[in-house]
C-alpha cells in the first residue's frame, strides 16, 4: 500500500510542472517580469509565424495572459496581456520543462509560492 501511495504521489507530482520566475528571468519590454497575479494563461507562440492579436482573440478568459514569444520580439504590455521573452537558454529550458512540441500552445499556471508557479491545466494547441 505504501508503494502504491508513493507511485501515485510521484505520478501526480510529475504530471504538472513548475516554473520559478526568480530563477528563470523573463523580460517585458525593458524590465524584468515579476508575476503579481495568482493565475495566468500562458500563450507560447512565435511572432514570425502568427500575429499574436489573432491568437489572443481565440482565448476566452478573464485571466491575465503571459504571451511568451519564442522569436524574442519585445512588445509593449497591453490590457490583460503581458508580452515576455527571455534568452535562448531560458526559452529552451522553458520549452523542455513544459514539453511544448507545437506553437501556438496555451496552458494555465497558478501561484504555489511567492514566485513559484505550478502548471494548472493541460497544454493545448491553438488552431
Image (cartoon, grey):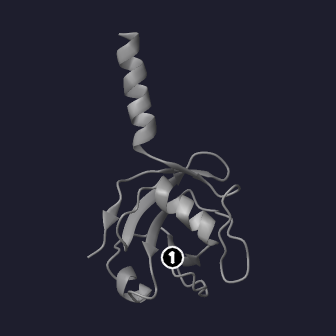
Name the residue at the right extreme: 31
Quarter containing the N terminus:
top left
Q: Quadrant of residue 82?
A: bottom right
Identity of the residue drawn at 64% across and 63% down:
35
| 116 sits to left or right of 7 | right
**Is 62 situated above or below 107?**
below
Judge left or right: residue 21 versus residue 53: right
What's the residue at 45%, 71% (across, down)? 44
Q: According to the image, label 1 marks what residue?
A: 70
Residue positioned most to the left:
127
Q: Residue at x 62, y 65 (%)?
A: 89
Report the number of numbered marks: 1
**Residue 103's spot in the image, x, y percent?**
37, 73
Label 1's element?
A: loop
> What percent of the width, then of the height, locates residue 42?
47, 66
| Residue 50 horizontal/vertical position (percent) | 38, 87
Q: In the displayed structure, would residue 113 be above or below residue 127?
A: above
Left of 42 or right of it: where is 4? left
**Is the residue 40 above or below the residue 82 in the image?**
above
Quarter of the image containing the C terminus?
bottom left
Residue under the image location 59 percent in, 61 percent down:
37
Classify 10 Å Cα crowding around label 1: few (below 14), some (14-19), many (20 and above).
Answer: many
In this orientation, which residue lies closer to the viewer: 90 or 69? 90
Residue 36, quarter of picture: bottom right
What x and y, as percent, mark residue 81? Answer: 52, 78
Amino acid at each position: 500500500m505504501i508503494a502504491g501511495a508513493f507511485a501515485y504521489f510521484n505520478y501526480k507530482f510529475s504530471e504538472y510542472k513548475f516554473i520559478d520566475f526568480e530563477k528563470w528571468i523573463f523580460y517585458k519590454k525593458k524590465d524584468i517580469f515579476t508575476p503579481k497575479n495568482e493565475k495566468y494563461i500562458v500563450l507560447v507562440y512565435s511572432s514570425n509565424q502568427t500575429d499574436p492579436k489573432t491568437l489572443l482573440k481565440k482565448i476566452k478568459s478573464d485571466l491575465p495572459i503571459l504571451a511568451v514569444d519564442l522569436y524574442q520580439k519585445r512588445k509593449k504590455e497591453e490590457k490583460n496581456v503581458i508580452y515576455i521573452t527571455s534568452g535562448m537558454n531560458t526559452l529552451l529550458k522553458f520549452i523542455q520543462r513544459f514539453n511544448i512540441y507545437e506553437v501556438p500552445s496555451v496552458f494555465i499556471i497558478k501561484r504555489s509560492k511567492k514566485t513559484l508557479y505550478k502548471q494548472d491545466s493541460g497544454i493545448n494547441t491553438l488552431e
